[in-house]
Image (spheres, rainbow, N blue to C red):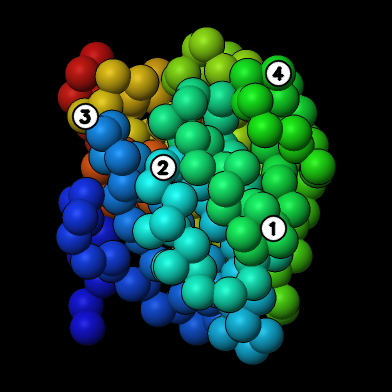
Amino acid sequence: MTYHGSVHVGGAPAVHELAWLIVTKLAVGPAATNCYLLRDRLTGEQLLVDAADDAPTLIRLVNGALAAVVTTHGHRDHWRALAEVSAATGAVTMAGVHDLAAIEVPTAVPLRDGDEIRLGRSRLTALHLAGDAPADTPGAVALLYDDPKGHPHLFTGDCLAAGHPHGPAPAGLLTGPLAQLPDETWVYPGHGDDSTLGAQRAGLGSQA
């Protein structure tokens, strides 16, 4: 089945099958926040990006053990189900080191720029996006998966959520931590449909 990256609350998840990693996208809660379940093909180890809301639905999606939950930033609609999901699955909680005070659930592993998260044989890198959108979450992090069999994949939270009040990011973001990434980098936003960095850069250029 072709991955389209378009989901809605109450609807079926969308599944993006990569060579080493399977990405399942689901929208939950009143803000239609996107959650992403990442599963390493070799080991079956799983990681959730943003336990946003509706814990029972997310726990059913996980359907077993969960290595970690990474919270991209401190907005409540991205961690409302974190306590329940981590308790039910045994997941380690992770978040950007500068955003810990904004998340009411204790963070076991603070993430700094460049930190690596291992998921089976897959590797994710935390990118610190402080000072960009959203400006009121100083420790926002994106997760970069550099697919060894394809182009990079980027999980951005609200920092590149087109059509959302906190996005798209200002031009400075695309000339900062993400500047070295190619246009074909696939963007998984905190709200709305998927995109690419190329499309985001083109959109910012048209607004100039």
Mark nearest the camera among 3 and 1 is 1
Mark closer to the observer (4, 2): 2
- Name the residue that disc number 3 marks: 163
Q: As shown in the figure, which amino acid type bears the numbered disc 4? A: Ala
N-terminal label among 3 and 1: 1
Q: Is residue 53 visible in this depiction of the protein? A: yes
Q: Is residue 168 left or right of residue 101?
A: left
Percent coordinates x, y for residue 12 in the rendering:
22, 66
Of 167 and 89, which appears nearest the observer?
Answer: 89
Label 2, on which residue? 53
The quadrant in which residue 165 appears is top left
Tell me the SS state at disc 3: loop
Q: Amino acid at mark 3?
A: Gly
Q: Determine the CA span between mark 4 and mark 3.
A: 27 Å
Between the residue at mark 3 and the residue at mark 1, the CA separation in whole angstroms equals 31 Å
Q: Residue at x 26, y 27 (%)?
A: 164
Q: What mark, if any, has residue 101 been given in the picture?
A: 4
Q: Decide which of tag 4 and tag 3 comes sooner along the chain.
A: 4
Q: How many marks?
A: 4
Marked residue nearer the N-terminal end (1 or 4): 1
Instruction: Give the numbered dot on residue 91.
Output: 1
When the figure is inspected, residue 57 is found, relative to residue 30, above or below; the finding is below
In-image side of 37 versus 14 (left or right): right
Q: Is residue 123 visible?
A: no
The answer to whether the residues at label 4 and label 3 have Cβ atoms under 8 Å apart is no
Residue drawn at (57%, 43%) of the image? 82
